[in-house]
Image: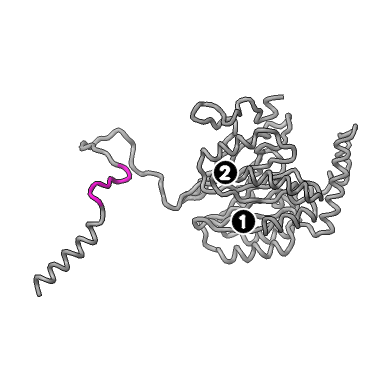
Amino acid sequence: MHLLFRILVLLIIANTFGCRKADSPAIFHHEFSTENQPWTHLNFDGHPDQFSFAVISDLYGGERPGIFDVAIEQVNLLHPELILTVGDLIDGGTEDTVQLIREWDRFDERAEKFTAPLFYTGGNHDLTNVTMRNFWEERYGARYYHFVYKNVLFLVLDSEDFNPERMQDIHLARLRSIEVLESDTPEQVVNTEYWNMDERLTGEIRSAQAEYFSEVLARYPDVRWTFLFMHKPVWSRENAEGWKTIENKLQSRPYTVINGHFHSYAHTTKNNRDHIILGTTSGAQSADDPSAFDHIMYITVTENGPDILNLRLDGILDKTGHIPVGGDSLCFQASRCF
């Protein structure tokens, strides 16, 4: 009986410690036997919960040819685990369903070239009127949604959340503004109704959307970080009641807000949190604005929170030392080129 017990113990030890192959090296292996080595330390930055994701900004209005194709190649070289957008993915602004199918087919075809999954956000070019809103919902489902990745909460908001009547009023006023822009006196656009609407700059979030995100935040109180993506900076308007409801639910947690729309990069701190307005990823630029440039935001979520950096498209070179897909001939900042 004593011999059988010893055999069982040996079998348990063999199964517990014998599964590792003798010739399987550690992740880092060296053959120094001396006390001194030619490196600083071996505290590698490789936590299993750490991950990186990319954010692309406005394509429209006024996409400049070739820029977005460069961005796709560059994002793929960076190998993010996921990619977020901040809206204005198509030119839009139409109630012609055939035209919408054509524009969204083109964008979806381009989006499939990203190796990482791409998460859509609607902008004013994507959700200009009730027809476009219905088209989005039929094709992509929810206009606002959330997901969790590695215990990080992502909230994607719809900043074009107007009631149908107000949305139509804004759409018609926008069309009249475009007519002025395309006339012999484009400078008069500043006197149009649309130009002077608060909604043109900051959008809207209604109570149903605010309640949805309030409930989501209540369900995920202990995530590591919360990111909020939207097109227009609803957070910048003092009387934005729907946003205030969401913002009040955010107070006790770490979060970052990211949006686009203005085609000019800006960073501000509100409630001791980062609020970032992106530049462009091929959208139109002002030649008088040094903050209007094409870039990719690249965020690495670490144990201590997010590390955020901006990579200019004219500074991401492939192994040949050139901007991919013929990008060396393109202009990525209007104020430097014109």
- Which corner quadrant holds the N terminus? bottom left
Q: Residue at x 80, y 60 (%)?
A: 163
How would you rate the neighbour count of disc 2 (Cα within 10 Å): few for under 14, some for 14-19, many for 20 or more? many
The disc, 1 or 2, on the residue closer to the chain's N-terminal end is 2
The magenta segment is 21-28
Residue 261 drawn at (x, y percent): 71, 44
Gap between marks 1 and 2, in whole Å? 21 Å
Circle 1 sits on which residue?
155
Q: Residue at x 83, y 50 (%)?
A: 171
Relative to 298, say whether 13 is above or below.
below
Q: Between 264 and 181, which is closer to the camera in this rendering?
A: 181
Q: Residue at x 50, y 26 (%)?
A: 320
How would you rate the neighbour count of disc 1 (Cα within 10 Å): few for under 14, some for 14-19, many for 20 or more? many
Residue 337 drawn at (x, y percent): 69, 25
Q: Between 71 and 337, which is closer to the camera in this rendering?
A: 71
Mark 1 or mark 2, which is nearer to you? 2
Indicate the quadrant where residue 252 lies: bottom right
Relative to 9, say whether 254 is above or below.
above
Relative to 79, say whether 164 is above or below.
below
* Secondary element type, mark 2: loop
Q: Residue at x 87, y 49 (%)?
A: 172
Residue 264 drawn at (x, y percent): 69, 38
- Which corner quadrant holds the C terminus? top right
Circle 2 sits on which residue?
114
Residue 283 drawn at (x, y percent): 70, 37
Q: Between 49 and 164, which is closer to the camera in this rendering?
A: 164
Q: Is residue 27 magenta?
A: yes
Q: Is residue 312 magenta?
A: no
Q: Amino acid at mark 2?
A: Phe
Q: Amino acid at mark 1?
A: Leu
